[in-house]
Structure formats: C-alpha cells, structure tokens
Amino acid sequence: MKAPIILATDTSDLEVAKQWAKLVAPHITGIKLGLEFFLNFGAEGARAVCADHELDLFLDLKLHDIPNTVGQAAAAVANLQPRFLTVHASGGQAMIAAAAKELPATEVTAVTILTSLGEPDLIEIGYRSNALDSALALAKLAIAAGAKAIVCSPMEVAAIRAAIGNEPAIIAPGVRPIDPTAPLDDQVRTMTPLAAIEAGASYVV
C-alpha cells in the first residue's frame, strides 16, 4: 500500500520533476504540479512527468474566476485526466459547480484558506471569522456545490472531517517535521504529517 502522500513538485526544471516522479512513484500516492510548473511546461510537461508512472495527478492551479471562465479552464485540462484539480472555494458555488460539470471524472478540490495566511492576514483581507470557522464554512459550501475534495491546513482537518463526513478527500498541505529548526517555507498553520493524518486527512502534501 502506498503512503498517503502527494509530492509537491514546485520546480521550474522539467528534468528534475521527471526524476522526482520516477523516484517516488513506487512509494507514494500522487504528485502535485502547481502553477509555476504549469506556466513553464503546460499540458505536455504534465504528461511527461506522469508518463509511465502510476501516480495520481494533483493539478494545483487554484482556479478562481467567473463560473464560465473556470468551467472552460477545467475543460481545457480534461485530457490530462487529473485525479484532483484545485479551485478556490471562495469563488462561490456557481464557480465550483462549473468546474465539476466539466470534469465529472475528476475530484474537483476546493481550497479553503491558504496555509500561508495567519489570523492577522485574514482580518486585513476582510474575513469576519477566524481561520477555522472560515475554512469550515468554505468547505461546506464547496461540497454542497459539487466539490469532491477539500484542501485545508492540518489545523482545520478535524473540524472539517466532522462536518463533511468520511467520503470527501481532505488534503493537507503545510505539514512539517517535529524538528523546530525545519524551515516553514511560507507556511503558517502547520502540524506534523502524522498529526494531520490522525486528525482525519486523507493525504498530506
């Protein structure tokens, strides 16, 4: 059984990404290709990284636009057959539903509150609730709109799992080792990988 880990392939070097995929494919569930990678290499790059490997593709584009635009963007990546495609939950139900309509075989994955944001950031942006309450509300909205998976920080996993049940996948980025000297890399709301899984996360990134 493969570990419930999705490797964040945050690189602008195609050969490095391909090598990483080859190394981890026997051991973990999936590989995350984000905006940096996709803008550099596009769909062909994604195919090259995923070729000959049984890795689930987590296409982390975090789409956030009007519903028609997001629907068309989702349709444009359908031929990659991603298991997960991220959209921002704050785009609203119509936007999430538009993506889900175009990708019935993909788990449209709603990003709640970015793990780089702390409570002062949320106040500055204009959120009226704390990170936990905001993420919980966005997760409920997204599942109601047709999202099949949720991205949230490990600190919100337990509450969201209790609210949405066992079936939707919860994916937790922002995991860090116990070592207090380990770099945070823009992450604010973090936990260890084991703690995230024990809280109810399906996968950690």
Image (cartoon, helix red, strand yellow):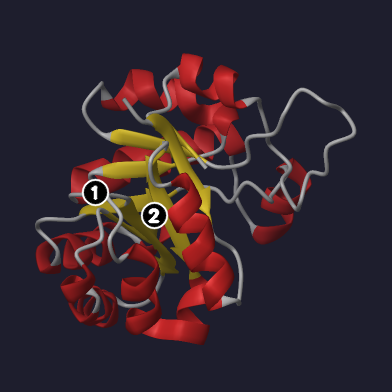
* Residue 109 or residue 51, whichever sits in front: 51
- Horizontal side of residue 97 vs 91, given as left or right: left
Residue positioned most to the top: 198
Question: Marks 1 and 2, how far apart in space?
Answer: 9 Å
SS state under label 2: helix
Residue 176 on image: x %, y %: 69, 34
SS state under label 1: loop
Residue topped by disc 1: 147
Residue topped by disc 2: 89
The amino acid sitting under disc 1 is: Ala
Residue 14 seen in the figure: yes
Q: Quadrant of residue 92?
A: bottom left
Residue 130 seen in the figure: no
Residue 119 on image: x %, y %: 72, 42
Picture residue at 32% right of the left edge, 50% below the top: 55
Residue 167 on image: x %, y %: 21, 27
Q: Quadrant of the N terminus?
A: top left
Q: Are marks 1 and 2 in contact (CB under 8 Å)?
A: yes
Picture residue at 25% right of the left edge, 34% below the top: 168
